[in-house]
Image (cartoon, helix red, strand yellow):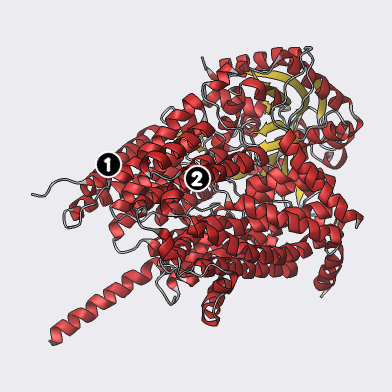
Amino acid sequence: MENIQLLLQGFETALTFQNVGAALLGAILGLIVGAMPGIGSLAGVALLLPLTYKFNPTTAIIMLGALYYSNMYGGSFSAILLNIPGDSPAVVTAIDGYPMAKKKKRPGQALFTANMSSFIGGTIGICILTFTGPALANLGLKFGPSEMTALLLIAMTSISWLVGENPTKGVIITVVGILLASMGMDTLSGAPRYDFGNMHLLGGIPFTPFVIGAVGFSQVIKLINDRTKDNGASNSDMKLTIRGSLLTKHDFRRLLPPAIRSGFLGTFVGVLPGAGATTGSFLGYAVQKKMHSEEELGTGAIEGIASCEAANNAAAAGAFAPLLALGIPGSGTGAVLLGGLMMWGLNPGPLLFTNEPDFTWGLIASLFLSNILTLIIALAVIPFLLKILSVPVKYMIPIITVVCVVGSYSSSYSMYGVLIMFLSGLLGYFLSKNDYPTAPMLLSFVLAPLLETNMRKAFIISGGSLNIFFNRPITCVLMVVFFAVVATPIIKSMINKNKNKKTEGTN
Amino acid sequence: MKKKVALVLAGIMAFATVVTGCGSKAASDGTFTPEDTINWTVTSSPGGGSDIYTRMIADVMTKEGMTDETIVVSNKTDGSGEIGRNEVANTKGQKADYTLLTFNSGDLMPMVLNTKNRSANFKIIAIMAVDKQLIFKGTQTPYVDFAEAIEAAKNGTPVVIGGSKGDDIATYEAMIEEIGVTQDQMKYITYDSTGDAITAALGGHVEFVISKPAAASEYVEAGSLFPVLALSTERYTGNLASAPTLSEVGDYENVEVPIWRGVAAPAAMSDAAVAYYTEQLKKVSESEQWKTEYIEKNKLIPNYLGAAEATTFVTEYEKEYMEANGIQ
Amino acid sequence: MKKIGSKQLIPVLMAAVALVFGLVGVFQLGFWDAASGPMPGFFPSIMAVVMFFTSILAFAQSFKETEKAEYNKFELLVIAAGAGIILATFIIGLVPACFVFVLLWLRILEKAPWKDVIIILLVIAFIVIGVFGMWLGIQFPMGLFEYIL
């Protein structure tokens, strides 16, 4: 009960005219930055940080909170409309968002779904943060190297759900992602790995240009085949107004269960050290793959968009728990916010909740506030965004190409980023031409390094013994789940084979 | 109403800085005053020691009115920071006058070890202070003090220490050599940042964590970390006073690996700009805020060296390090 | 005997990549240390082995696939354009390279009317120079001009 009281006080702090104005401004700027590929929330928050020095800490952090949130919304816009993810969590949004906008001719609904689910996921995340705050952060602390290894093993199995019809190709593409991710500096030994003597490879393959290329640029290459099709005619049956973008009751019913489930899942992932919003959205989507969806995922299903969008916004909220309660940034963006807190003379850390209750509860209240404001603004801009779709494909090709180039340059401040974008575009293009799915590659690229470092840390602690994975309670439970997940399909197929034999026998 | 107006004004100001912020030139009379955003690169994660250090300098420079321009601190951790350092080293043209790099011994060591980049590719602007480390234990650590842990390690129970890259590893290596245990008896887990290592210690996943005072002091204050060993020739003061030095723990020599904290710039930075920044950093080092909120709070040793002395010092340091590691 | 197409080529390339990663992993980076467990090469080399064998499997399977991957010359044109922008950047700088590309593409390939071309160039100028360049403060490479100025 005390928490609610504190939260209400927080709302009192947050709900001043200046603060609401700051949140609005942050939301608008965030949407624009988020929609630009290559500029993730990290860069957005970092760029806006100096601007906020003129405000008091509460106003400033409210503005940044709104910016952080709306960035997540913005990232899904370009993913859905152009198949270029604006930031890394939006990679998954594109899998269903783009087909829904293009093939199903329901771009407005796709955007609406993304925004509504983001809102639901974010709200769940903030609610959990409100009631469990420090306790949640302490739960995250329980996850050491062995626990993380077991959890990531489970996450890795989810890749197999995304693989599609040809498992051999699925395995190859997954390993390609893992090998590409293994290039660069190896933190644990402090030595370079697979850098082949190249300075840039020492830093590994940067994720953002890799994604822009593998998803966005390879898409443009394929898009050229549609260039002669007149887009204008096909667009006339699309409803490009806000009214035409509204979800039906039925749509809404499809959206709700995955959004709520992902909201909880995402919050939990966000709390874990080093996991972040991208892992959250992948996991949310993978879980949905196991659940019932009205249409198959990947063909433009509402469930697909809802599951990942809700998860990544919830993860963003979850990441605030360790940040506020322990002073540990759960993500790069969190880290910049942490820097901001210090600039305003606050000491983030275990004492922040007790020493600065006005500020922390004001911040949590402002997260609620910015979540709502961002939703309103995002919904209001949908009709304008849809105008993009009436641009003929042949004009879109050069525009998207330029945006890919500029975006990948901006994410790394070097032509190396552009080169990576170009090469991974080629890779993505050739692979998809030969029926290799690209999503598993992106997922393993994100998860494998986390899995590897955690596994190796666990082995260093245990001195190379496997015991560490079984004599710690949380790890052991997770390992059992992992083996169950792996074994179930094998046992199932064995039972099926037996059944088949029996039926053949009786025949 | 006033607040609304203020907000609008802030927005216009922001826009104006963006618009006017392009294409200014250094004054022609040989002195330099920045007329553009200063980009400051930090090659380690936010929240860590180097980050706190950089943001503090930037804050002092802004608050004391040394510059009206915004100082943008960006953390470039790609390739363990090598990419960021290489970028700064290769920054050319007018931009070079607006680019700064946080550069300390922990950055120099891996750079020299793993790449062809050398301190000669930079202009060393200043050295601000010298830092040292301590070892802390978490609440779940079974050992009462570090002497007990040494005993355990020698008797075959592995002890796990977490820490960051670079200078933390160098200090750890110097320490176990003095104690006389192997890397298998007293293990070291490298984390991406001190913050991550502290997280692991809070969760009880490593028994001890090696850290400079700055990053750990909040947790000591809150009672979730306890200082158990000062890697210094004398004890610290304040809330870290309870940590003995190695010679107090047992029959060992004190181990101390001082870490200097400096500021570097691209080799292409003009001499006028170097002179300007050296002067500003000197003012920072003399300011009250720097002394109380950084040096005292984080228990560093103030040690300002201007551009010329700093360059000599770093060159010498690099030479010794390369000789010790057999690098050509 | 069917002709060898890109469906066969990809598994062969993948197997080669796997071989390089595996060998470097085991022999240069180290596989397992008796006291502290996995070394830097441990995880990648296991993955490389997995990839090597699945590539062989995929190579065998590829002959069963009846559809051949088709490449359209326009698709190659987009790739060439991408490469062109990167090369041109080193000479005339990133932003001009982008503008020249859009101009040439629209006028020569699409034969678009000048009105459309100008509108598109303005849109791109807004995104690239307005948002990325001015607001986000990104300095784009200037190519050879950097040395002249």
Residue drawn at x 62%, y 68% as measured from the top left: A121
- Most extreme residue toward the left is C1
Relative to B236, residue A380 above or below: below
Q: Secondary structure at mark 2?
A: helix
Measure how far apart labels 2 and 1 are at the Cα level: 46 Å
Q: Amino acid at mark 1?
A: Leu
- Most extreme residue toward the bottom is A506
Residue ID for mark 1: C13
Name the disc covering residue B167, or none: none
Specify few, some or many for label 2: CA neighbours under 10 Å numbering under 14, 14-19, or 20 or more.
few
Q: First in sequence: mark 2 or mark 1? A: 1
Nearest the eye: A227 or B188: A227
Contact, mark 2 vs mark 1 (Cβ under 8 Å): no
Name the spot of residue B313 as percent of width and height, x first. 71, 15
Q: Amino acid at mark 2?
A: Lys
Residue drawn at x 16%, y 57% as measured from the top left: C64
Relative to B23, residue A301 above or below: below
Chain hosting mark 2: C
Res A264 visible: no
Q: Is residue A439 left or right of residue B188?
A: left
Nearest the eye: A132 or A11: A11
